Image (cartoon, coloured by chain):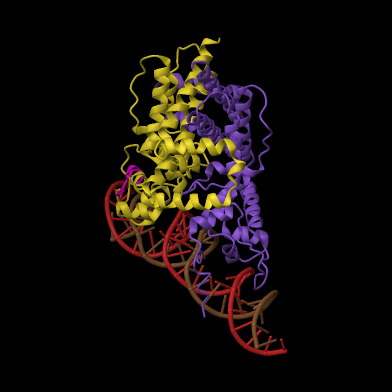
Chain colours: A yellow, B purple, C red, D brown
Amino acid sequence: MYNHEMAAEQTPPDEPARTLRLLWRASIDDGAPRRGPRPRISVDAIVDASVALADEKGLESVTMRAVADRIGVGVMTLYGYVPGRDELLGLMIDQIATEGVRPPHTGTMRERLEAVADEQFAECRRHPWIVDARLPRPWIGPGGSHRYEWQVAAIDGEGFDDITMDQIVTAIVAYVHGAARHWAGEQARMRLGDTDIEWWTSTGAVLEEVMDGSQYPVSGRVGQAAGEDYGLGDAERSYRFGRDALISGIEQLRTTR
Amino acid sequence: MYNHEMAAEQTPPDEPARTLRLLWRASIDDGAPRRGPRPRISVDAIVDASVALADEKGLESVTMRAVADRIGVGVMTLYGYVPGRDELLGLMIDQIATEGVRPPHTGTMRERLEAVADEQFAECRRHPWIVDARLPRPWIGPGGSHRYEWQVAAIDGEGFDDITMDQIVTAIVAYVHGAARHWAGEQARMRLGDTDIEWWTSTGAVLEEVMDGSQYPVSGRVGQAAGEDYGLGDAERSYRFGRDALISGIEQLRTTR
DNA sequence: CCCTTTCCGCGTACAGTGTACGAAGTAACT
DNA sequence: AGTTACTTCGTACACTGTACGCGGAAAGGG
């Protein structure tokens, strides 16, 4: 005997909608007492465990089994809370967007834009694995929404039209992601420690043998200078350089209109 | 009975060195006739097949089995030519860096930097999967080296010191990568076609229900404007916006010294 | 000519992945 | 007590990268 009424709206919550509700933690908890055993864990527990795992050992070590082990349940239990691994990744990404500290904007526009870039970069620094994470869907969750609101607010009232405002934020975020990618790569290499030096010497020897230096007049000189002067460890300086240039360009946009 | 002589230098070519030689196609072909059957395929064939596969169906569909099937050999045959999947990925990345057309630089510095950015962006456009590819090692191959040489040459003789030159190129490449990431995401969504519209409407309905619009005064307005005006399909316009801003900032760098 | 040596091709096997299915158990409602 | 709704999770399957080792093919030496 079926209840025709309840089948009306939401019998099988279609996939995207379910994940969206999950992102906003819009559990359908209408106070009515649920049957069966109370859930032993929660989405938050799963997401937190996954983030911790990714922070410690990288994204590829976030397997469903590893996550389940970490919170002490069977693997398949997770699927009662989360549709699948991809959706879990979306939850993780929005989760870390929530952590950022974003004080009200003050100072010049340049300072505000710097803050926007630095906050986004700090997020990547805390969780280097986001640069590896690519999603089939751009899930719109609370974390990302709050961040975007704060980012756009940084240039509100500066005389830009709405579309330009969006493009400014998009450009900065894009740059930060790209720079963070380089930074994360360098970071991963540094974590290998001495192995890395060994690798570079071995690499250098082979390169010397195999590539014709005379074919690279400019980059040979520049690459060497860059390598000697700041070597490993200054993807961060590079980040700041590009950040400042980009913001200068945006500033100029305002004065030339 | 062993030949002691040949064991002296290169009995087991250590992993990185081997891949490096592979990148530069420095086969140890010393003219001496090899025993046994001639190789039936080549590294190039493997790399080409892999790139084609990635172009057609995305990076995750580049499995060793799929590649082997495509060129009509057994899976394990590949391992006679290539150390493993990660190294193959490195070969693919350097391969597509070879394809770019990079004419001698002409015009103003702005035009030259635009060309640098656009060429790098075109590469990402041709092979959207590179934004997904992250390598443990930054392999230095001929493709990437030529590209870097050309990129640095674009600002040679403009009065920048070597380190600044490197940072300029790095910043542009970083930005392009970030923008390409957004572009690739949008592209993937567009390829889903009508499914996507359906998805957005469904998403919109849920969002309306679940997120409190009043919490997002600025982004609510801006997001709507951006969505209405150029909707899907203009990650490219965004790219140009940021590119121009970044280059403006770099130009300014020169005049202020 | 055969035998040895050296190399290529690749079938099989294994540990690991995400997840579909369905059985077992538990708490509330009738 | 019986029914119903709900959570947990063992098992199974298709798929991944790749180690091992066998069989055969081409060249060199007798």
Whether D19 is drawn above or below A93: the answer is below
- Image check: B183 left or right of B163? right
Q: Residue at x 44, y 47 (%)?
A: A83
Q: Looking at the picture, does residue A13 appear above or below residue B121?
A: below
Can see residue B61?
no
Residue A3 locus on image (x, y percent)? 45, 45
Q: In the image, residue B82 lies at what x, y percent?
A: 57, 59
Residue range corresponding to the magenta coloring: A39-48
Quadrant position of the C terminus of chain A in the picture? top right
Q: Is residue D28 left or right of residue A231?
A: right
Residue drawn at 53 percent across, 75 percent down: B3
Magenta-span inclusion, residue A140: no
Q: Position of residue A167 (x, y in %)?
A: 53, 23
Dominant SS in magenta: helix
Is A243 drawn above or below residue A75 in the view shown?
above
Q: Is residue B99 above or below residue B154?
A: below
| Count of numbered circles on the image | 0
Depth check: B200 or A61 in front? A61
The verdict on residue A46 being magenta is: yes
In this orientation, which residue lies closer to the viewer: B204 or A213? Answer: A213
Q: Front-most of A254 and B99?
A: B99
Q: Quadrant of residue D27?
A: bottom right
> Can residue B40 be seen here?
yes
For image coordinates 35% across by 57% down, the residue present is A74
Rendered location of residue A246, percent (x, y): 49, 23
Residue A42 sits in quarter: top left
